[in-house]
Amino acid sequence: MSGYQLDIKDILKRLPHRYPFLLVDRIINLDLDNNKIVALKSVSMNEQFFQGHFPGEPIMPGVLILEALAQTGGILMFEKGFQQIKVLTTIRQARFRRTVRPGDSLILEVEASHLSKRGGKVQGVAKVDGKVTTEAEIVFGLLTTNEPQEVV
């Protein structure tokens, strides 16, 4: 199946994250045939991190944009049949090109380049108004229990 959408209720069924750490509001397009997903994060001044991240000049922290890309990739992996908890293991070639501010609609585009029973690797690009704000390669591992374990 390709080309479908998910709302926040669907996202909550697929990710373990909850407020204030859920950073994906909607899935705009999910294309399982091509291992691609596009999500939306509506950035609001009400976000908790704006209270302490450059008060008076609010900018979304880059690490949270990376987390939003990782969560988007986690939804893609879930839809591909990997329903274990996904944990971020590596971030490569992260680039921060533009700031993200309250009122922005952050578009999160993720494409899986590798998926296996041990984890996956995705390329992520975040955009506002069609302009790249952040890009990175993100690697996930899969946890099979609630016990702490080494992720390779």
Image (cartoon, rainbow, N blue to C red):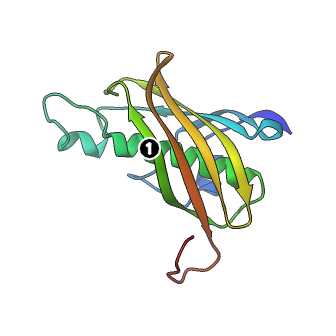
> Does 98 sit left or right of 149 as displayed?
left
Across and down, in percent, residue 41 comes to: 48, 34
Q: Secondary structure at mark 1?
A: helix
What residue is drawn where x is 49% and y is 56%?
Answer: 90
Q: Nearer the viewer, residue 98 or 59?
A: 98
What residue is drawn where x is 69% and y is 53%?
Answer: 77
Task: Say which quadrant the C terminus sits in.
Answer: bottom right
Task: Say which quadrant the N terminus sits in.
Answer: top right
Q: Which residue is mark 1?
A: 66
> Does 123 sit left or right of 22 as displayed?
right
Across and down, in percent, residue 14 comes to: 64, 55
Q: Nearer the viewer, residue 95 or 18?
A: 95
Across and down, in percent, residue 68 comes to: 48, 43
Which residue is farthest right? 1
Across and down, in percent, residue 3 comes to: 78, 31
Which residue is farthest left? 56
Which residue is farthest front? 93
Count of labels in the image = 1
Which residue is farthest bottom? 147
> Disc 1 residue type?
Leu
From this view, report whether residue 123 is shown above or below residue 87. above
> Does 107 sit left or right of 77 as displayed?
left
Question: Could you tell me if residue 70 is visible in this image?
Answer: yes
What residue is drawn where x is 34% and y is 39%?
Answer: 62
Question: Could you tell me if residue 23 is visible in this image?
Answer: no
10 Å crowding of disc 1: few (<14), some (14-19), many (20+)? many
Task: Using the rendered view, name the quadrant where residue 105 is placed.
Answer: top left
From this view, report whether residue 148 is shown above or below residue 4. below
> Does 110 sit left or right of 125 as displayed?
right
Task: Using the rendered view, name the quadrant where residue 81 is placed.
Answer: bottom right
